[in-house]
Amino acid sequence: MKKQKVNKKSTKLSVFRRKNTLFIAFALIFALVGGAYLYISHAEVPLKPPIKGLVYTNRVVPPQGLLQKNGTPIFNNAVVLLHWKDLEPTDQNFNTPAWDQIDQYTSKGIGVRLRIMSGIHAPDFVKKMGGPAISGSGIDCNVSGGIAVFNTWDNVGGCVPRFWTEQYLYQYKQLMQEVARRYDNFSAGKYVLDVVDSACMTVYAEPFYRAHKSSDSHKRLYNAGLDEENDKKCHRRAINIHDRTFKHTRTSIAFNNWELLTAKPDNQYRVATDYGLQQAAIFVAESR
């Protein structure tokens, strides 16, 4: 595993790769990004421990016998994947049973990385914000709202909100504030160790991907307003939200090649420009 150290003021940034995803670890003020992705810590702020050891990553909650043996947790930690629409189906309605899935792990002393899926999994009231529905690629967004995105990598798609707009980011901020209210403490939230930054995602919680090679999806996103400036603005705002909201809970963000959407000079064909793994990582570090 190759490591490259980049010093910037008091920040220590280590960049290394695993498969096609970049993971970063570094120390700064407050708890920002963590785990298999990016960490921020500060000596004066008590932080929960990072994710480590044996991690359960299956989305399905396993039977009791696979979580504990003789009262002792078998796994050190687990990644708990939930959909935003299940946690907040309507505006400010957080009283749903989906939150109980977190407790199935924390009640057994298993640390949790909380991955809340936005993008195609955002609630409809959020998808309807900022503009009319834009359907395409066989995906009808007229009922849910949002913009049709189809990821040709594994043929998965859906309708995404205008995640770069302030309306959307305000809703995401409220969601993170609810997460912090429940879990950013050392009592009830003791075992929720970090929260994934998924604010700017489309299909997966890898927020630097857009639609891989689906040029039609990129055209729709670009025409709806997602250009390079707004994409960067979304990430800066999301980083700021996590930085200000979580004081003890770490945050993680996945790094991939950054698909920044641009237009050719004839303004007829929209393409995604591969901004690169390391550039995306350094952008996030500097945005902090």
Image (cartoon, rainbow, N blue to C red):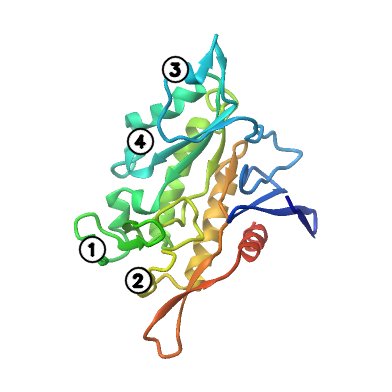
Q: Which residue is mark 1?
A: 138
What whole-number distance in Å separates the C-alpha atoms at marks 1 and 3? 41 Å
- Characterize the local packing of mark 3: few (<14), some (14-19) or many (20 or more) Cα atoms within 10 angstroms: few
Looking at the rendered structure, which numbered label has been put on residue 64? 3
Q: Which numbered disc, 1 or 2, marks the residue that appears first in the sequence?
A: 1
Residue at 38%, 68% (x, y): give it. Answer: 214
What whole-number distance in Å separates the C-alpha atoms at marks 2 and 4? 29 Å
Image-quadrant location for residue 94: top left
What whole-number distance in Å separates the C-alpha atoms at marks 4 and 1? 32 Å
Tell me where residue 227 appears, x and y as whole percent. Answer: 45, 73
Is 68 rendered above or below residue 273?
Answer: above
Amino acid type, mark 1? Gly
- Characterize the local packing of mark 2: few (<14), some (14-19) or many (20 or more) Cα atoms within 10 angstroms: some
Q: Which numbered disc, 4 or 1, marks the residue that appears first in the sequence?
A: 4
Is 172 rendered above or below residue 47?
Answer: below
Q: Which residue is mark 4?
A: 94
Q: Which numbered disc, 1 or 3, marks the residue that appears first in the sequence?
A: 3
Tell me where residue 217 appears, x and y as whole percent. Answer: 35, 68
Relative to the observer, which residue lies in front, 282 or 149?
149
What whole-number distance in Å separates the C-alpha atoms at marks 2 and 3? 46 Å
Amino acid type, mark 4? Phe
Q: Which SS class for mark 3?
A: helix
Amino acid type, mark 2? Ala
